[in-house]
Image (cartoon, rainbow, N blue to C red):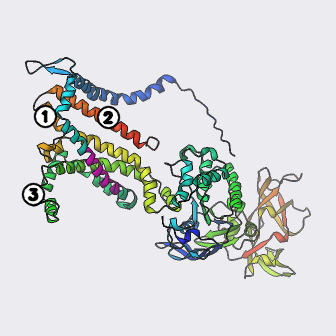
Amino acid sequence: MAKDASTSAQGDLVLSNLTKSFGDFVAVDDLNLTIPQGKFFALLGPSGCGKTTTLRMIAGLEEPTNGKISIGNTDITYAKPYNRPVNTVFQNYALFPHLTIFENIAFGLRRRGIKDVDAQVKKVLELVELPHLADRKPNQLSGGQQQRIAVARAIVNRPALLLLDEPLGALDLKLRRQMQIELKWIQTEIGITFVHVTHDQEEAMTMADTIAVMNKGKIEQMGTPEELYDSPKSAYVANFLGQSNLIAGEVEGNDGENSIVNIKGNKVSVPKNRINSANKSVLVGVRPEKFRIVASGKNTSGNILNGGKVSDVSYTGVSTQYQVEMPWGQELMVFEQNDDNEPMLRKGELVTLSWEPVFTFALDGSENVRAGA
Amino acid sequence: MAIFRTTATKFKSPVNRKSLFPYLLLAPGLLYLAIFFLAPIATLGQMSTKTKNSDGVTYSQVFRFQNYIDAFLQSKEQFARSFLYGLLATILALAIAYPLAYGIAFKAGRFKNVLLVLIVAPFFTSFLLRTIAWKQILGEEGPVIKVFRALHIIGPTTSLTASAFAVVTGLTYNFLPFMTLPLYASLERIDPRTLEASGDLYANGFTTFRKVTVPLSMPGVVAGTLLTFIPAAGDYINAAILGNPDTKMLGNVIDARFFRIVDYPTAAALSFTLMAAILILVTIYIRRAGTEELV
């Protein structure tokens, strides 16, 4: 079979001005993205945000309306799927039902006329810890085993890029957790660039070095899991990755490194470098687990919000989750670790919320508080 | 490594009522088969070893197995022809039906159902009528012969009717839907993602077709070829209407023995021989095709 130069391309994956429209609907909107070689990258977003379309364009299964895709210096925008150094782990694995596990894995090697098929297939079966299943057919395997074989079938080809399309979606929670760790381990082991598409924020945070949060065909924010979680740049990201309390306030002044924000009469400090707003009116963001909750009148420090009333309590083992109704009517979410002997606060009790200023971020006040929730 | 534990809890069911139910469902079908298939087969079997009495009307059972040998030797030419024509029609039908079914399954989009109805539509007119129509199509005034003559495929005096060509054409035409429908069913069942996966794994369009599409459509190929070959090999209407004395198939011989010469034992022996031959061929074919696990 004729081989294209692009099958041997190496380097960073670069998407420039990538656009895909289906009729009037713009699925992917002028996307610019560089994924460094050897990284575990996650495209995260709800269904319909354009992440799968982006993946399919990289795989060559969908042709871009506009823009360019390249790996290193090689342009692969219009290369046929079989002429790209890219392999995919499909959502429902798409194993060949008529071939044995061995032949499924050998498929790509045989198409490229590679010599030591036997040794390579055996090696990758060892890697996914399923060497004893070589002679079975896919339908004789469990979901988790099929998942591993789908990964093996792709990585045996040593692609420059491995695409994973919601690969763990069909597995139960326990198996999913285990496969997350395994996939991460495999990626570290073989050093191939992984591009992982998922709507599960926990899955993305567990595995990826870098996450791009997508919304309506565009990238909302990109960064390490910690960056996205601690300093979200928009309400959408703040709500989609974990939970956030976003409280409206006005910037009133300065205090060294911090800005002073007035929240309904309460003055709180927010680090200046974590304010992503040009406006005076901002949304002050605090993650639920950053709050401390104490009965009203007790001493506490840091930023303080008084006059809350517990409106709901739920005990989850590691933590207790409180809903606290503030005097201005907003419900705030508080996760309190069950790591002390303090008695649980009861519904209806008056409380004071406090937190360390460093755990605060602030967004533009004109944003929709519920975006991405 | 994950270990899966399945908890198999067995519920004891009230044995009598539940275990009888499947048989009740089967009963009408079994009864029908017994009356209209097994009984006639048994009668046919008995008849095949009888001889005609001197009165020329009645028969007596003498277990004359020589009937089989006589019958076969008398009509081995037609025997061979039945299988040859059946085989040719099957190959032609497969060649026509595969692209057709493939097109409907993968490319037809919203016209899928319309096209499927069109495939079945010929069944609304009689089999006999449609076969006679081929006489017109291939006849001196028809379009086919004009094209063939213009292209010098046949000479100006050769005709297409009353020929082996016409018989095989008729057989191919008549059994085409039986080939197309099972093919369509198996192609339609293929998960398009396996085809995408094949492309993703360095197979071009043709290799994907050869290595994934064709193997996955084998159940349809086997079912379609059987549904075409079995009736085509036993057919006699096409040979009777579109053929000549030199294109007679075994079905025509059996027809003649039963209804014209009134030689029941020979006709019965021939029927049995044909049945056995087809059964053996089909068994070998299914074994070789090895599609049990895909069906």
Label 2, label 1: how far apart the Cα atoms are: 23 Å
Res. A181 visible in picture? yes
Label 1, label 3: how far apart the Cα atoms are: 29 Å
On whether residue B94 falls in the magenta region, the answer is yes
- In the image, the segment drawn in magenta is B85-101
- The secondary element bearing badge 2 is classed as helix
Which tag, 2 or 1, sits closer to the chain's start? 1
Q: Which residue is mark 2?
A: B279
- Circle 3 marks a residue in which chain? B
Label 2 neighbourhood size at 10 Å, few (<14), some (14-19), many (20+)? few
Which tag, 1 or 3, sits closer to the chain's start? 3
State the residue lying farthest toward the right.
A299
To which quarter of the image does residue A277 belong? Answer: bottom right
- In the rendered view of the protein, which quadrant contains the C terminus of chain A? bottom right
Residue B165 point in image, percent of width and height? 18, 51
Residue A299 point in image, percent of width and height? 92, 63
> Is B24 above or below relative to A327?
above
Residue located 41% across and 27% down the image: B23
Tell if the residue under mark 2 belongs to the same chain as the one under mark 1: yes
From the viewer's perspective, tell me whether residue A227 is left or right of residue B147: right
Q: Identify residue type, mark 1.
A: Ala
Tell if the residue under mark 1 belongs to the same chain as the one under mark 3: yes
Residue A187 point in image, percent of width and height? 68, 60
Q: Which residue is mark 1?
A: B256
Q: Which residue is mark 3?
A: B140
